[in-house]
Amino acid sequence: MSRIRVLIADDHETVRQGLRLLIDSQPDMEVVGEAGDGGSAVERADALKPQVAVLDISMPQMNGLAAARSIRERAPATAIVALTRYRDEAYVKELLSAGACGYVLKQSASTELLEAIRAAARGAGYLDSTLTNNATNPLAARRGVPHPRITDREAEVLRRMAVGESNKEIATALDVAVKTVEVHKANAMRKLGLAGRIDVVKYALLQGWLRDP
């Protein structure tokens, strides 16, 4: 039986080393490449054509979300598993929408990642067992259930909200009424499942609107 060919991408070398040891110890999988940032992950995926790419979300130059989208375009046969410390529903939804078929938490048991890799290799979805499905079922996403998208204006309102602008300041900048800003904000947060400003800031970081600390 041929092994599952895996690419791992994480900006911490010690994490990559640990993942390599874990994956290479399995009789049915092997690491064929590593990357320390999102851009390199896309290049390696394009060149190596691995069956599965394991991506961290927080990486320099290009984060995991952007890398997932690029890999889906340049190496569509490569299944993507997100490996991250973020358990927020907005993160799960965005990664699944970008083409990831698996989402695993770094703080979970290593068996979660191994099962996610195996599931991804056979074309199935996998969600970390510590997360509730709550509209983030990867199988549903892969069956084509539409992911709610926000408009450009809604995105602009969220971006400005994330950097600390008030409704009045946003209204002045966009030359609209404060009530209009409130409507855009409410619609965007409802679509994305965001509960408050902290969630909005996390979402902004994921989208690359802010510098990840």
Image (spheres, helix red, strand yellow):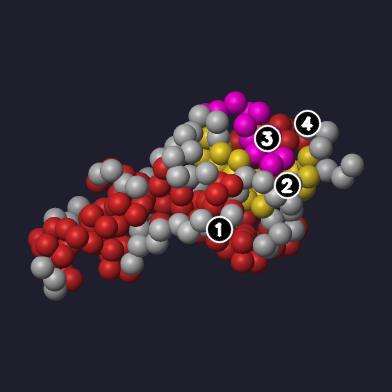
For disc 2, the neighbor class at 10 Å (few under 14, some 14 to 19, many from 20) is many
Using a 10 Å C-alpha cutoff, classify the residue at mark 4 as few (fewer than 14 neighbours), some (14 to 19) or many (20 or more).
few
In the image, the segment drawn in magenta is: 106-119
In the rendering, which numbered label is found on residue 121? 2
Q: Is residue 198 above or below residue 191?
A: above
Cα separation, mark 4 vs mark 1, equals 35 Å
Query: Are the two marked residues, 3 and 4, in contact with CB atoms closer than 8 angstroms?
Result: no
Quadrant assignment for the C terminus: top left
Rendered residue at 28%/43% (across/down)? 195
Q: Amino acid at mark 2?
A: Ala
Which numbered disc flags the more N-terminal residue, 2 or 1? 2
- In what element is the residue under mark 3? helix
Quadrant of the image occupied by residue 153: bottom left
Residue underneath mark 4: 25
State the separation of the CA atoms marked 2 and 1. 19 Å
In this orientation, which residue lies closer to the viewer: 67 or 120? 120
x and y, in percent, of residue 47 in the image: 73, 62
